[in-house]
Image: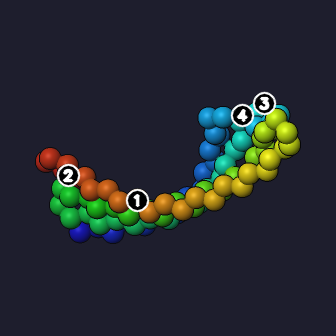
Amino acid sequence: FKWPLRVGAFTDRQYFTDDTGQAPRFRGLTVGTGLIVGPVMLDAAYVYEWGDYRTDSGEALVDTSVRSRRLLFSAIYRHGGR
């Protein structure tokens, strides 16, 4: 069997605009591990993402701070793979 580990960082432009008309950028960190046994791959990852932006509600500017934590799992079977 094999035991992969990973660590990463990313930046993610959002699909909406803030009060300046620009899409905010969120940043994130991820760590993960997996297990490969023959053709089966199991994976677990933790993702932490954060970002801030300001919007105009029509009456006042609203500051929004986003913090997201996710735990993701996956399983893959590769036919004929090792």
> Disc 2 on helix, strand or loop?
strand
Would you call the spot at circle 4 few (<14 residues within 10 Å), some (14-19), or many (20 or more)? Answer: some
Q: Which residue is mark 3?
A: 21
> Disc 3 on helix, strand or loop?
loop
Residue 76 located left or right of residue 51: left
Give amino acid for label 4: Thr
Q: Which residue is mark 2?
A: 77
Q: Earlier in the sequence, mark 2 or mark 3?
A: 3
Circles 1 and 4, Cβ within 8 Å, touching? The answer is no
Name the quadrant containing residue 13: top right
Q: Where residue 59 sits in the image (x, y, percent)? A: 85, 39
Where 13 sits versus 47, above or below? above
| Front of the two marks 2 and 1 | 1
Q: How many marks?
A: 4
Residue 65 located left or right of residue 67: right
Q: Which residue is mark 1?
A: 72
Q: Where residue 82 sits in the image (x, y, percent)? A: 20, 55
Q: Earlier in the sequence, mark 1 or mark 3?
A: 3
Circles 3 and 4, Cβ within 8 Å, touching? The answer is yes
Front-most of 56 and 33? Answer: 56
